[in-house]
Image: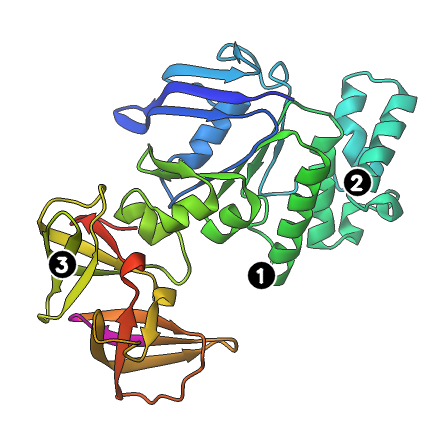
Amino acid sequence: MAGVELRNLRKSFGKVEVLKGLDLKVEDGEFVALVGPSGCGKSTLLRILAGLEEETAGDVLIGGEVVNDLSPRERNIAMVFQSYALYPHMTVAENMGFNLKISSKPKAEIKARVQETAEILDLVHLLDRKPSQLSGGQRQRVAMGRALVRNPDVFLFDEPLSNLDAKLRVQMREEIKRLHHKVRTTKIYVTHDQIEAMTLADRVVILDRGIIQQVGTPTELYRNPANAFVAGFIGSPAMNFLPGMLQSDSDTARIELEDGSVLTAPRKPNHPRDGKVLLGLRPEHIMLGEGTGTSNALTGRIDLIEPTGAQNHLRIKLGGQSTTVVDNNLTEVELGQNVAVHVDPDKIHIFEAGNTA
């Protein structure tokens, strides 16, 4: 196993700079997810790590050694792609052992390593089948097995679940997580799905326009987003953003919204200066009803009701903005009804006015 480090990594295509001086350290045995919108540079970064793309500047280190000039094979990495890329004329066992075969490993060693990997991935009963006889989830497990059997220093995953349906994606997430607990090899996983990133990874790297916006555990990113982009990208349903004017003293932040209503929150060191701000409210932190008091109470009209079974998602006009509210109590409400809500002051986020995810 080996850790991975990026030092001032840059990549340009002509005059377009795709990666803008990235610094990142992935510890030995850690599972890190790279997540961000399309075009943020995450797949380009993965290809540079794999040696499939050349960096414009900066260094890539694996196991403490600079590998910029090493080929993909010399880096001892294994990559799992979005497409399964299995040889249709080969059995599962032959597909999994193919890289070992072309590396001239002894047949006995190939068979033993394929068998060991098949047991980890629950593929033993499928070793004699061809890819056409497998389900999508089984094919993806074979693709992971083909990478795992090589015993690499680092695993790279490039959106490996994108071709699967929703139910199978959940199942494969569980299998990848179990695999990581069994085989503590360093893993770097690219996805556009923030739920996938948060459920799988030890730490998540949020990328936007070639810049790392924040690195942290899923809980850290959810509770303490560094900026409005991260706040809007992490969480489902997405965070609500309401424009407002901030006035604060040493203890209290007071935010006046567009319709004149006011919310207050404890003043924090990372709050922006007084003036125009974005108030961030997670849908699950806006509660129907006025609460125990009248502070941080808002009223608005229900414009949309979306039942999801365990909860209702409501669209309510609050503070002059259409706002999503998650109601876990399945309160009986109607379209057009005026309702009161309240917000826990400790759950309020305040950001500089600007772009969100």
Name the residue type under label 2.
Ile
Q: Residue at x 72, y 47 (%)?
A: 139
Q: Which mark is residue 120?
A: 2
Residue at the (77%, 17%) spot, across then down: 103
Please report the bounds of the magenta region as a residue range. 315-320
Q: Is residue 148 magenta?
A: no
Q: Which residue is mark 1?
A: 166
* Disc 1 secondary structure class: helix
Q: Residues within 10 Å of mark 2 (few under 14, many from 20)?
A: some
The relative height of residue 31 versus residue 297 in the rendered view (above or below) is: above
Judged by depth in the image, the label closer to the viewer, 1 or 3, is: 3
Give SS at disc 2. Answer: helix
Q: Nearer the viewer, residue 92 or 250?
A: 250
In-image side of 319 versus 56 (left or right): left
Q: Could you give the CA–CA distance between mark 2 and mark 1, rounded to whole angstroms?
A: 24 Å
- Mark 1 and mark 3: Cα distance apart in space: 42 Å
Q: Amino acid at mark 3?
A: Arg
> In the rendered image, which residue does mark 3 sit on?
254
Q: Quadrant of the N terminus?
A: top right
Q: Residues within 10 Å of mark 1 (few under 14, many from 20)?
A: few
Residue in the picture at 65% in, 42% down: 84
Residue 233, given in percent of the width and then of the height, sits at 36, 51
* Number of residues whose C-alpha sits closer than 10 Å to that of mark 3, classed few (under 14), some (14–19) or many (20 or more): some
Which marked residue is nearer to the observer: mark 2 or mark 1? Answer: 2
Q: Does the CB distance between marks 1 and 3 fall below 8 Å?
A: no
Residue 154 position by quadrant: top right
Whether residue 86 is visible? no
The amino acid type of the residue labelled 1 equals: Ala
Residue 69 horizontal side relative to residue 170, left or right: left
